[in-house]
């Protein structure tokens, strides 16, 4: 339940989401489960070496399963736990998870109420994945958290909500501390009405780079929900094929920055496999 409304898996990738039936996942996920093995198959096909896995309250807490995934595939997945107090942060670290994902847009209290969580994460050297509300009300709160926890690595999700008036303010949070990044998971969802090759999304990526520099931006896909509309490869292909971003900046945005920020190691060399239809 979120805000008193139901979240319920059905079949064929469909769910009741906030009391409305939607295609939450691709229809071939008939049991509603996007397992690590299904994801790895998509990653290998799309030549994605490693993935950062975050969480959302609409899926329930996935800490137990993701801790198993982290142990089984340590070089392919960087899995985030869910935690709402310092003791839960300790449990996340003990389970071998690499960070904590907090959907801040679903937090009703001021974000400062979670300061013990952020302080403990800083002590445990866990990375914070944080999505913010699509207005200005959490900007100053998040800036205060960044200043209070200068060693805490923070990835601001949904690329700062580029379809809203708070976009510039969210991106500028990367100037508040040396360990703050902006990641683009969900940007194709936000520009789905425009659809591939998402020219406005490309412009927003360039605008963000003008504000904080290319070294503060990272690609993200928001898989699996985004691939109800596009393929996993398309979620980065619109950047890779854009003539408006230089090759050097594509290298930073599509991988190099994430390797540095998350400390990714031992990435596989994945060959391109030709489609039968080519």
Image (cartoon, rainbow, N blue to C red):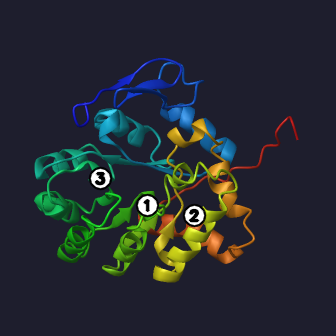
Q: Is residue 3 toward the left or the right of residue 250 in the image?
A: left
The quarter of the picture where residue 63 lies is top left
Of labels 1 and 3, earlier in sequence is: 3
Quadrant including the C terminus: top right
Label 3 residue SS:
helix
Q: Looking at the picture, how far across and down is residue 72, in whole percent?
A: 44, 38
Q: Which numbered disc, 3 or 2, marks the residue closer to the eye?
A: 3
Of labels 3 and 2, earlier in sequence is: 3
Q: Is residue 154 visible?
A: yes
The residue at which mark 2 appears reads as 255
Q: Nearer the viewer, residue 194 or 222?
A: 194
Q: Nearer the viewer, residue 174 or 259?
A: 174
Quadrant including the N terminus: top left
Q: Residue at x 15, y 64 (%)?
A: 119
The residue at which mark 3 appears reads as 105
The residue at which mark 1 appears reads as 161
CA neighbours of label 1 inside 10 A, class few (<14), some (14 to 19), many (20+)? many
Q: Nearer the viewer, residue 135 or 148?
A: 135
Q: Residue at x 27, y 54 (%)?
A: 104
- Cα distance between the residues tagged 1 and 2: 21 Å
Is 85 situated above or below 215?
above
- Give the residue furthest to the right: 278
Callout 1 touching callout 3 (CB < 8 Å)? no
Q: Residue at x 85, y 35 (%)?
A: 276
- Cα distance between the residues tagged 3 and 2: 27 Å
Mark count? 3
The quarter of the picture where residue 262 lies is bottom left
Q: Looking at the picture, how far across and down is residue 118, in whole percent?
A: 19, 61
Q: Looking at the picture, how far across and down is residue 156, in whole percent?
A: 38, 63
Label 2 residue SS:
helix
């Amino acid at each position: 339940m979120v805000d008193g409304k139901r979240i319920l898996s059905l079949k064929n990738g469909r769910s009741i989401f906030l009391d409305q039936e939607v295609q939450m996942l691709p229809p071939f996920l008939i049991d509603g489960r996007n397992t690590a093995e299904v994801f790895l198959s998509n990653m290998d096909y799309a030549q994605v070496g490693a993935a950062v896995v975050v969480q959302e309250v609409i899926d329930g807490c996935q800490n137990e399963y993701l801790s198993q995934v982290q142990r089984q595939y340590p070089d392919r997945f960087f899995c985030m736990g869910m935690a709402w107090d310092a003791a839960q942060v300790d449990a996340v670290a003990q389970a071998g998870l690499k960070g904590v994902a907090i959907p801040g847009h679903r937090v009703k209290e001021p974000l400062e109420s979670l300061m013990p969580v952020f302080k403990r994460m800083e002590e445990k050297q866990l990375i914070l994945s944080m999505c913010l509300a699509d207005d200005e009300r959490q900007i100053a709160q998040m800036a205060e958290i960044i200043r209070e926890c200068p060693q805490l690595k923070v990835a601001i999700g949904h690329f700062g909500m580029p379809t809203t008036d708070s976009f510039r303010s969210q991106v500028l949070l990367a100037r508040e501390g040396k360990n703050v990044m902006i990641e683009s998971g969900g940007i194709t969802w936000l520009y789905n009405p425009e659809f591939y090759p998402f020219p406005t999304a490309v412009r927003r990526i360039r605008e963000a780079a003008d504000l904080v520099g290319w070294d503060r931006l990272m690609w993200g896909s928001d898989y699996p929900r985004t691939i109800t509309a596009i393929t996993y490869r398309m979620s980065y292909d619109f950047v890779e094929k854009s003539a408006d971003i230089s090759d050097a900046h594509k290298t930073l945005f599509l991988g190099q920055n994430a390797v540095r920020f998350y400390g990714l190691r031992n990435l596989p060399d994945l060959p391109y496999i030709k489609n039968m239809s080519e």
